[in-house]
Image (cartoon, helix red, strand yellow):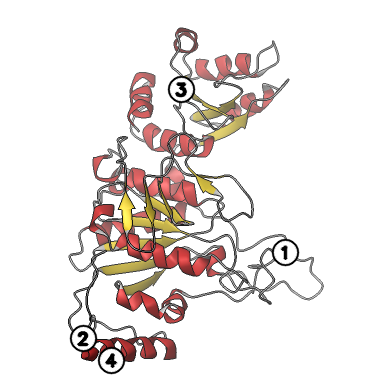
Amino acid sequence: MKLISLSPSLVAAIALTTSALRGTAQEIPPIAPPGLNLPRVVLMSMGGTIASRGDTRMNINNYGGPGSPRVDPEHWVADLPDLALIARVTTEDFRPPQPPPAAPGAPPSTGGAGGTTTEQLYKVARRLQELATDDKVDGIVVTHGTNTMAESAWFMSLTVNIKKPVVFVGSQRPWTGISGDGPLNLYNAVRIAATPAAGGKGVLHAMNQNINTARDVTKLSAYRMDTFRSIDLGVIGVADPDRVVFYTEPLRRHTYKSEFNIANLPADSKALPAVECVYAYTEAPGYLIDALTEHGVKGIVVDGTGAGSPTGGATGQTEAIKRAQAKGIIVVVTARTRGGRVQDTPRRRESGIIPADNLTPEKARMLLQVALAKTSDPKEIKRIFDEY
């Protein structure tokens, strides 16, 4: 970011702006303070821990149930008046409706409002595609729950034709928690979205000052701050206090290079081809794959042992995979080690199982879904996994 020298009058204008922001969330300035030509960033909420409030500052792991208070997008802007010095921020809310509190005498809820749905991903992807052509928008930040954030960001990277910066961000602790990571994560995400160098790199993920690609990032710890990492390839940049710095470029196809634009997918999210995941382990049975075959799935992702191997045996996964393939089901294999590629060996080519490179099973599932919406040719699908 370029450092600027502020005149006394400009400092006064900024002070008035930040004072207004503290007073009410609705007083976001439509233009920057005089003398500052700031980037325009849309802050879009998809919910999650960063949009949650605990009942005490020490409540950092038991929050967000039905009826619990939430943090609206405009509250973030009001709580972080510092944003007014780095971008002109407007907000949009794409959270699902909050379920009502449990009725008296009903058992307590075991979780929050529920996970992200494909229908919700469709809505966000379509909105991002609209923003891609809006000359009044320079960058976009999407807040999301950390449990499935990497999947959602990957879906956007596959389906939205955009060169503007798109940054997914969340937090491991609620907005109200002591030592909460949400405020700095959100501030840095806006900084990244306002940085022109962040454009054209596909959908990015930014937490704990690290910048990862949506393709490679994964969550590795339930509660720790450094939970998100790209195991094989590492970060592509950092959001340091002085400036946002990038060191590498993603080479796999994404966003404006992708062939899976949201406009070309089935109009109804429920019409996406059904793809499910199974796990490989000692004596894993084949009947789970048989059941999925009978249920009518179009693809199966096997999270394989070692370098991506299903379990064998007459009653194991290997024989069930053959039965599924005989019925036209595409089978893709990932490696449960989470590090290293599934390689294209002669034995694997003979089996007809498609290697998913180093994708996690949930991301391989999404890629297989959009691929099957376009083609059922195994050679074409293998080409897609090689390129994405």
Distance from the alpha carbon under mark 4 to that under mark 1:
49 Å
Please tell me which residue is depicted at 22% across the width and 73% down the height of the picture.
Answer: 4
Disc 1 secondary structure class: loop
The nearer-to-camera label among 4 and 1 is 4
Disc 2 secondary structure class: loop
Image: 276 above or below 121: above
Inspect the image, locate mark 4, and give the three-letter code of the amino acid beneath it: Ala
Distance from the alpha carbon under mark 3 to that under mark 2:
59 Å
Distance from the alpha carbon under mark 3 to that under mark 4:
60 Å
Marking on residue 109: 1
Please tell me which residue is depicted at 55% across the width and 33% down the height of the picture.
Answer: 338
Image: 371 above or below 283: below
Marking on residue 7: 2
Q: Name the residue under label 4.
A: 12
Tell me whether the residue at label 3 lies in contact with that at label 2, contact meaning CB atoms closer than 8 angstroms: no
Inspect the image, locate mark 2, and give the three-letter code of the amino acid beneath it: Ser
Q: Check the picture and name the quadrant holding the N terminus.
A: bottom left
Marking on residue 355: 3
Near-viewer residue (316 or 218): 218
Q: Count residues near mark 4 (Cα–Cα under 10 Å), then give few for <14, some for 14-19, many for 20+.
A: few
| Picture coordinates of residue 139, whole percent (x, y) | 28, 62
Inspect the image, locate mark 1, and give the three-letter code of the amino acid beneath it: Ser
In the figure, is residue 32 to the left or right of 81? left
Please tell me which residue is depicted at 50% across the width and 37% down the height of the picture.
Answer: 231
Tell me whether the residue at label 4 lies in contact with that at label 1, contact meaning CB atoms closer than 8 angstroms: no
Q: Count residues near mark 1 (Cα–Cα under 10 Å), then give few for <14, some for 14-19, many for 20+.
A: few
Near-viewer residue (44 or 358): 358
Inspect the image, locate mark 3, and give the three-letter code of the amino acid beneath it: Pro
Image: 264 above or below 335: below
- Which badge, 3 or 4, comes first in the chain's sequence? 4
* Numbered disc total: 4
| Picture coordinates of residue 221, whole percent (x, y) | 62, 48
